[in-house]
Image (cartoon, grey):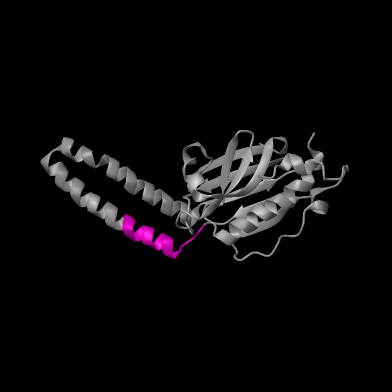
Amino acid sequence: MQKFKNRESNQPKSSGTRIKDIVPQPLKRHSNKIVVEKVDGDQSLITLKPAGFTASTAGIIFFALFWNGFLVVWTTMALMASFLFALFSIPFWLVGLAMIAGIVTNLFGYQEILIRRKNMVVRKFTVGFKIEHTIDYNTLNSIELEKFTKYSNRTKNSFKLAASGANDSGLNSKTVAISHSDKELFIGEHLNESDKEWLVEHLNNEIVPLLRYVS
């Protein structure tokens, strides 16, 4: 793992340079799910659009309709027999609601990465919810792709809102991991593999020149 701190020594010291003068032009990418724009002279905003309606999302919607439809029938019949017996359906309803939440996130959830001179802000949005996290560059270790198996083992400690693996499947898929301090922050879970690779390269290209401003 190549550390950001190791790269800082290779960056020339300067002062008064604005981010618009040192950020490279966006590299060529394979989809329109990533939008890069300038907020002002010293800030750059990367928006990761929702996964949208895909074949994977269609499959989840079909299964969620079947699952929740069956639960409606089963719970109704259980209530006729006993209220206590119907309570056994609660864990299955939680699974059904989780599937609905994942569908809504895939269709409408998006992420933003605000690149500033001394820190970056990551925001994850879904319907009615927002999670925000600020990362100072002096705590940043690396931005790289990690195997999905490593990611899935850490989801309970991760900064995660969007459903993972929306466009990827299998244990060979990867996710974008931002390592800072003793934590890891996962972003772009819903992007395809080539867009994840593009995002890692672009973030590194934007942030490495800014290390000259880190004290």
Q: Quadrant of residue 195?
A: bottom right
Residue 161 can be seen, yes or no: no
Above or below: residue 117 compared with residue 57: above
Q: Does the magenta stretch include residue 52?
A: yes
Q: Is residue 37 left or right of residue 178?
A: right
Percent across and percent down for residue 50 are 53, 56
In the orientation shown, which residue stands out farthest toward the front? Answer: 1
In the orientation shown, which residue stands out farthest toward the left? Answer: 81
- At 83% from the left edge and 48% from the top edge, which residue is drawn? 18
- At 75% from the left edge and 60% from the top edge, which residue is drawn? 25
Q: From the image, which quarter does the C terminus lie in?
A: top right
Q: In this view, does 171 lie to the left or right of 78?
A: right
Q: Is residue 108 left or right of residue 76?
A: right
- At 66% from the left edge and 43% from the top edge, which residue is drawn? 142
Most frequent secondary structure within the magenta stretch? helix
Chain part drawn in magenta: 51-64
Percent across and percent down for residue 57 are 42, 60
Percent across and percent down for residue 197 are 62, 57
Percent across and percent down for residue 97 are 35, 47
Q: In this view, does 158 lie to the left or right of 67?
A: right
Q: Which of 154 and 160 is in front in this view?
A: 154
Q: Nearer the viewer, residue 129 or 178?
A: 178
Above or below: residue 148 compared with residue 25: above
Above or below: residue 78 compared with residue 110: above
Residue 21 can be seen, yes or no: yes
